[in-house]
Amino acid sequence: MKKLFKLGVIGCGFMAQAILKGVTASDFLRAKKVLACDVSEEALDKAADLGIIGTTDCRYLAENCEYVLFAVKPQNFSDVCKSLSGVVPEKVISIMAGVTRNKIKGALGRYVKVARCMPNLPCSIGSGMIGVDMSDFNDSQDDLEFISGILNCLGTVLSIDEGKMNAVTGISGSGPAYVFMFIDALIDAGVKQGLTRNEATILAVQTVMGAAEMVEHSDVPVPELVKRVCSKGGTTIEAVKVLQERGFGAIVDEAVAACTRRSEELSE
């Protein structure tokens, strides 16, 4: 039986709102084909501002949507499953951190098809990074194209095996926080050297953006790019020496490893 809505979103928090904005701002899916569910009337009001119909009834959503996107906090997933009262969605998209496909199927039913995604904060401005395992849908090109289409509204999509999803969390899922910290440190350092905070912010932000774009578009390995900025007896090499001596690479490695371990713990 044909569903009333193409996409249903359970949970309308920050990331879900980013997805809803991205989808409705594109030509990919009309707002009237999307249904949002949340216990918060305020969250549903924000969805309504986008032209999206809202409900507080998860069961109604599951019955009437072809694809159901779970965007609730992992600890609330079991309560949502109870509220479905036996209604099992056939096609699920999940952005719940640490909740594996097996956990979702164990809660909903083993025949449910699940696409597991790990988006990050810049998805909220259409510049995000999303790791996704869509292997459950490999037998349907239509499903693959629809799920990819939704995610492409948010940024760059990387298809990846679910077994690597914890590492994706360590790099891109949590990575914006590391970059924000680096930018903030550059700004503070610039202020200490006599710049105004506004001047230091402009310099730091554009430098990070430009460097990232160079990495993206260059065939040169990153370590070689570092060497190209450094000239013998120059200024950059003195800064790089300090970062190397203080274990900059090792610190980043430890941070990503700690994040990945925590993601693994949440998956257990």
Image (cartoon, rainbow, N blue to C red):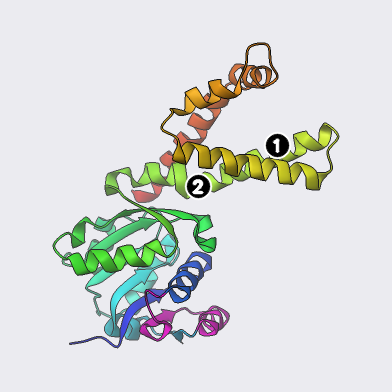
- Secondary structure of the residue carrying tag 2 is loop
> Residue 54 sits in which quadrant?
bottom left
217 or 4, nearer to the observer:
217
The answer to whether residue 109 shows anywhere in this view is no
Q: Is residue 186 left or right of residue 256?
A: right
Task: Specify the amino acid type for callout 2.
Answer: Ser
Against 263, residue 6 (above or below) is: below
The answer to whether residue 17 shows anywhere in this view is yes
Q: Which residue is mark 2?
A: 174
Q: Is residue 102 left or right of residue 230?
A: left
Instruction: In the displayed orientation, state which residue is furthest to the top.
Output: 233
- Secondary structure of the residue carrying tag 1 is helix
Tell me the number on the disc at residue 201: none
The Cα–Cα distance between marks 2 and 1, rounded to whole angstroms, is 20 Å
The magenta segment is: 27-50
- Residue at 45%, 63% in the rendered image: 73
> Residue 66 sits in which quadrant?
bottom left
Tell me the number on the disc at residue 186: 1
Q: Is residue 208 left or right of residue 100?
A: right
Where is residue 64 shown, x and y percent of the image? 29, 85
Against 72, residue 178 (above or below) is: above
Q: Is residue 19 left or right of residue 159?
A: right
Q: Are marks 2 and 1 in contact (CB under 8 Å)?
A: no
Callout 1: 10 Å neighbours few (<14), some, many (20+)? Answer: some
Task: Specify the amino acid type for callout 1.
Answer: Leu
Instruction: In the displayed orientation, state which residue is furthest to the left.
Output: 139
Is residue 30 magenta-colored? yes
